[in-house]
Image (cartoon, grey):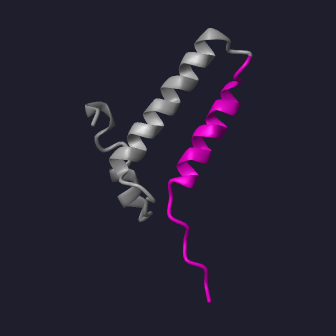
Amino acid sequence: MRPSSVGVVPEPAAAQGVKLRFPAEQVAAALGGIINGLAFERAIDPDALPEQLAAFFVSVLVRESLEPEPRPA
């Protein structure tokens, strides 16, 4: 695991009481990879990937990494 990602996902997830679909370290690694790739693309051509669009895709990855909340019966 990358030292920079230690605690980035597990601590906030635990503090908010959310459960992840995958181990927190793997979610952190995936987030880091996605963010690095998006930053690289924005560095090459910022107009091709607006900041709001990059943020949207990161938020989708985060949302889909969470276990769904149980539905009331």
Residue 30: image location, x then y, percent: 45, 39
Residue found at x 44% / y 33%: 32
Residue found at x 56% / y 45%: 61
Residue 29: image location, x then y, percent: 39, 38
Quadrant containing the N terminus is: top left
Image quadrant in which you'd find residue 52: top right
Q: Is residue 11 left or right of residue 71?
A: left
Residue 45: image location, x then y, percent: 67, 11
Quadrant containing the C terminus is: bottom right
Which portion, as a residue range, is magenta?
48-73
Magenta stretch holds residue 60 = yes
Of residue 63 and residue 11, the one placed in the foreground of this image is: 63
Single out the residue that lies furthest toward the top: 44
Image quadrant in which you'd find residue 44: top right
Magenta stretch holds residue 6 = no
Q: How many marks?
A: 0
Residue 5: image location, x then y, percent: 33, 37
Single out the residue that lies furthest toward the bottom: 73
Image quadrant in which you'd find residue 56: top right
As displayed, is residue 19 above or below residue 59? Answer: below
Residue found at x 70% / y 32%: 53
Q: Is residue 5 left or right of residue 17?
A: left
